């Protein structure tokens, strides 16, 4: 067994290069007068967990936080969001136009809301939804987006990972409006309180983009297992699993400990499992209490998606595998012997 310390992350500071005359033309919000608009992501009448992580980040900006809910079930979702501490007001855009969260329709709504009500910060989770909507919002407002933040240093300064998480950049935005997406695993979820924020209709949005896209359908992967993105325990399988059938070993172990199952990109690309299970820079970013990496070498792209896990256990027959450099505990062994034995012992 190995008990290894994790490497420290380098901090990189980027200084703005704008000229002084250009800066004098722009206004800046202090923590006291910040006005933040939180874009609420929801599906089937339920708010996604990442929205509550983004709410925590929004409250760290200081000032007031207003939530924006769009969709045919917006009123029901708004009632839920209004209960959370930090939310002072909820804007409701109840319209079938926003039924499927198409970015070409939601982005003009967010931009119109900012222009009419003067928000200084626009915040959303760094999810597929947030990454689809917020860049369009930034373009409509002619500002630069600050993506995937992991820390709020001040109203205009944030920290975000770069180079697949191997360095942390401290970024200062000189734009009058900050468009920000938040890495959910970097902030604790906000908690419901005895709050009861008021609700108001959202401003009317420009609907010229309605014909740019059309919702045709979706294919959802449903499972009785814990959701990979929010599970407290995760077992990940890599190329060392050799084929998809061998993943049954991981599912058996997962059932014993109440864990979700994920995979490295190598395993996904090899066709072992569906890409919805991919963990890493181009997959899901997770930070469970326990992560067990099985047959995963530890490519930098995979580490970017799981290195914030509280406890990392690596099982690999290659003692020199990079995964051991970030693991809290390591077992150099043949996974085809170690996993069945571990499952058997846990069962007893």
Image (cartoon, rainbow, N blue to C red):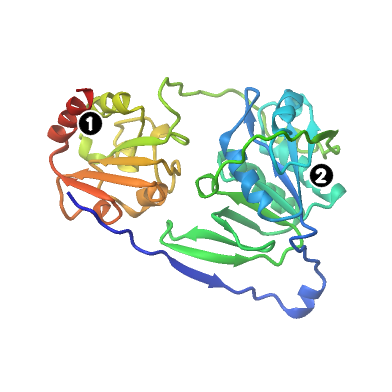
Q: Position of residue 87 (x, y in %)?
A: 73, 41
Q: How many marks?
A: 2
For the C terminus, the image quarter is top left
Front-lying residue, 114 or 189: 189
Using a 10 Å C-alpha cutoff, classify the residue at mark 2 as few (fewer than 14 neighbours), some (14 to 19) or many (20 or more).
some
Front-lying residue, 258 or 123: 258
Above or below — where is 290 with respect to 78?
A: below
| Residue 53, image quadrant | top right
Residue at the spot 78% in from the left edge and 60% down from the top edge: 32
Q: 145 left or right of 283?
A: right
Q: Position of residue 181 (x, y in %)?
A: 61, 49
| Residue 237, image quadrant | top left
Q: 7 left or right of 329?
A: right
Using a 10 Å C-alpha cutoff, classify the residue at mark 1 as few (fewer than 14 neighbours), some (14 to 19) or many (20 or more).
some
Q: Secondary structure at mark 1?
A: loop
Residue at the spot 38% in from the left edge and 47% down from the top edge: 310
- Which residue carries the number 1 mark? 243
Q: 165 left or right of 155?
A: left
Q: Position of residue 167 (x, y in %)?
A: 44, 64
* Residue 71 visible, this orientation: no
Q: Position of residue 323 (x, y in %)?
A: 27, 51
Q: Which residue occupies the extreme bottom position in the image?
A: 20
* Residue 271 visible, this orientation: yes
Q: Secondary structure at mark 2?
A: helix
- Which residue carries the number 2 mark? 113
Q: Which residue occupies the extreme front position in the image?
A: 194
Q: Earlier in the sequence, mark 1 or mark 2?
A: 2
Front-lying residue, 66 or 126: 66
């Amino acid at each position: 067994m190995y008990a290894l310390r994790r490497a420290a992350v380098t901090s990189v500071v980027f200084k703005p290069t704008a000229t002084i005359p250009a800066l004098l033309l722009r206004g800046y919000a202090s923590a006291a007068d910040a006005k933040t608009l939180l874009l609420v992501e929801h599906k089937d009448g339920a708010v996604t967990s990442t929205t509550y992580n983004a709410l925590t980040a929004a409250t760290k900006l200081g000032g007031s936080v207003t939530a924006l809910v769009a969709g045919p079930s917006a009123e029901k979702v708004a009632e839920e969001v209004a209960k959370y501490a930090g939310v002072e007001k909820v804007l409701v855009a109840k319209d079938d136009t926003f039924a499927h969260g198409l970015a070409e329709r939601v982005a003009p709504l967010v931009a119109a809301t900012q222009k009419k009500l003067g928000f200084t910060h626009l915040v959303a989770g760094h999810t597929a939804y947030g990454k689809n909507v917020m860049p369009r919002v930034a373009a409509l407002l002619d500002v630069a987006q600050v993506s995937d933040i992991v820390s709020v240093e001040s109203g205009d300064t944030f920290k975000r990972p770069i180079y697949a998480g191997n360095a942390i950049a401290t970024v200062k935005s000189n734009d009058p409006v900050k468009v920000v997406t938040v890495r959910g695993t970097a902030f604790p979820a906000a908690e419901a309180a005895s709050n009861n924020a008021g609700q108001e209709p959202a401003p009317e949005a420009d609907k010229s983009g309605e014909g740019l896209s059309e919702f045709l359908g979706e294919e959802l992967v449903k499972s009785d297992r814990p959701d990979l993105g929010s599970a407290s325990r995760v077992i990940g399988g890599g190329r060392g699993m050799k084929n998809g059938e061998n993943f049954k070993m991981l599912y058996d172990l997962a059932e014993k400990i109440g864990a979700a199952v994920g995979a490295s990109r190598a395993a996904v690309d090899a066709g072992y499992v569906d890409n919805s299970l991919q963990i890493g820079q181009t997959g899901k970013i997770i930070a469970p209490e326990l992560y067990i990496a099985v047959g995963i070498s530890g490519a930098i792209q995979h580490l970017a998606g799981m290195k914030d896990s509280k406890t990392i256990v690596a099982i690999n027959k290659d003692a020199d595998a990079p995964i051991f450099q970030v693991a809290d505990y390591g077992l150099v062994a043949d996974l085809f012997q170690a996993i069945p034995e571990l499952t058997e012992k846990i069962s007893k």
